Image (cartoon, helix red, strand yellow):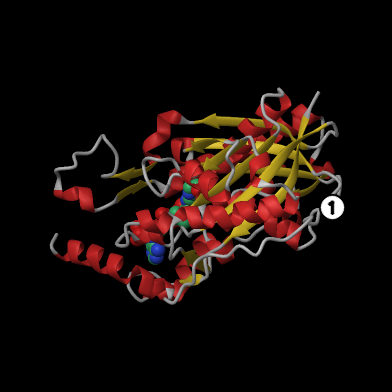
Amino acid sequence: MHYAEITGWGKCVPPAVLSNDDLATFMDTSDEWITSRTGIKERRICHCNFSDMALVSARQALAAANLQPEELDLILLGSLTNDSLCPNTASIVADALGARNAAAIDVNSACTGFLYGLHIGTNLIRTGAHKKVLVIGGEFISHYMNWSRRDVAVLFGDACGAVVIEQSDKECGLLAARIGCEADAKYAIQITNLGSAYSRLSDEFLYIGWNFEGQEVFKRAVKAMAQGCEDVLKETGLTVEDISLVVPHQANKRILDALAKRVGIPDDKVFVNVHKYGNTSAGTIPVALAEALEEGRVKPGDFLLTASFGAGLTWGAGVIKWGDRVTPLSLSDATLPPCDQTALEILAPHIERYANREQSG
Ligand code: UT7
């Protein structure tokens, strides 16, 4: 029996910070509302391409695992905000890395994109079909934001993370996972006006629309993630006492509190960074994992619990057993292209376009 050990990890958060007060300069919101409803204080805005963020996190993960790009045999990239419809972003990253022996697949399942990818990659390694897989998760969600929608725009941010998983005989990596989809509620989170279901001849084509049923998603997220956690604990024969740290999807601090309560895990065992980045969709779990390692919160042999929920409405949960190494074997000096604008300056033309649209009715 093979296992799929996580041997490398990395993250990329763009430098431009958009605070709650920045948002209140152009929409009817406040730091008080956003903080009390979500726990979010600030988020990052990407100034380059999504693949640039993916590349930086991938290079960090490869360096941490001390792996050459040509040793990879598969890249799985979870995102819905790809550079282009075609080619897929996994191919763009493969080429930029020089991963010429890797197949390249995009996994479009929104916030669960990373967990779905980790599950697929792990099982391809466990069956022996692949040996060294790069799993990336991230989002350039500000690019697809409707900046006149205060109920949605304050929630999200841009970031990306990655892990390398490698075939191992030691019992470690993602030991159990449950993934699913409440497809009957798929339109509770919907981005409209983009895609072949929408006419390219319509004036609406220029304006991205969002359907977002926040309260419905909140309730379903807590329930599905908690059920997923209970299922994977049962499957592995572990109890919550065996779990050292929960590294969940970061959409809202209140969701994390409700999840911890429902699963019976103390708050101090839940890794939280939603206050710094907001909801970065497929980016939240790999970024949180990289930060948990940086902060020394993962020890050799630890059992981690993870869970996610997002558009689809897709969900997932997993138990990860960490291996022997919690420090990177080497470091990458990869960085994003320089950014000489503030977050508000990057967004200004987009904010203006949506404001003009609102005014013209
Ligand atoms: O990644 C997975 C997908 N996402 C999620 O898991 C998110 C799940 N949902 C949530 O996190 C929460 O439902 C939200 C944070 C989105 C909303 O929190 P809520 O406590 O459910 O607020 P609400 O939607 O009930 O809105 C309460 C009020 C409304 O005003 P009225 O109708 O009571 O007068 C909204 O219009 O707050 C108003 N509101 C705002 N006010 C100030 C909505 N957005 C804002 C805003 N600033 N940004």
* Image coords of residue 349 (percent x, y): 28, 69
Q: Quadrant of the C terminus?
A: bottom left
Q: Is residue 73 left or right of residue 324?
A: left
The residue shown at (68%, 32%) is 122
Q: Residue at x 63, y 54 (%)?
A: 59
- Write down the residue under mark 1: 299
Indicate left or right for 179 with 109 as reference. right
Q: Is residue 3 left or right of residue 137?
A: right
Q: Is residue 340 above or below residue 214?
A: below
User: Which residue shows up at 25% across the image and 62% down it?
Assistant: 354
* Image coordinates for residue 186, horizontal then vertical, percent: 40, 35
Residue closest to the eye, 139 or 327 = 327
Residue 61, image x and y in percent? Answer: 67, 52
139 and 177: which one is in front?
139
Compared to 249, does 239 lie above or below? above
**Which quadrant of the picture is home to ligand 1?**
bottom left
How many numbered marks appear? 1
Q: Position of residue 21 (x, y in %)?
A: 44, 76
Could you classify mark 1 by the number of other residues whose Cα lies within 10 Å: few (under 14), some (14-19), or many (20 or more)? some
Q: Is residue 224 visible?
A: no
The amino acid on which the numbered mark 1 sits, given as a three-letter code, is Lys
Q: Could you say which is closer to the camera, residue 72 or residue 304?
A: 72
Which quadrant of the figure contains the N terminus?
top right
Q: Assign a secondary structure to mark 1.
A: loop
The image quadrant that residue 274 belongs to is: bottom right
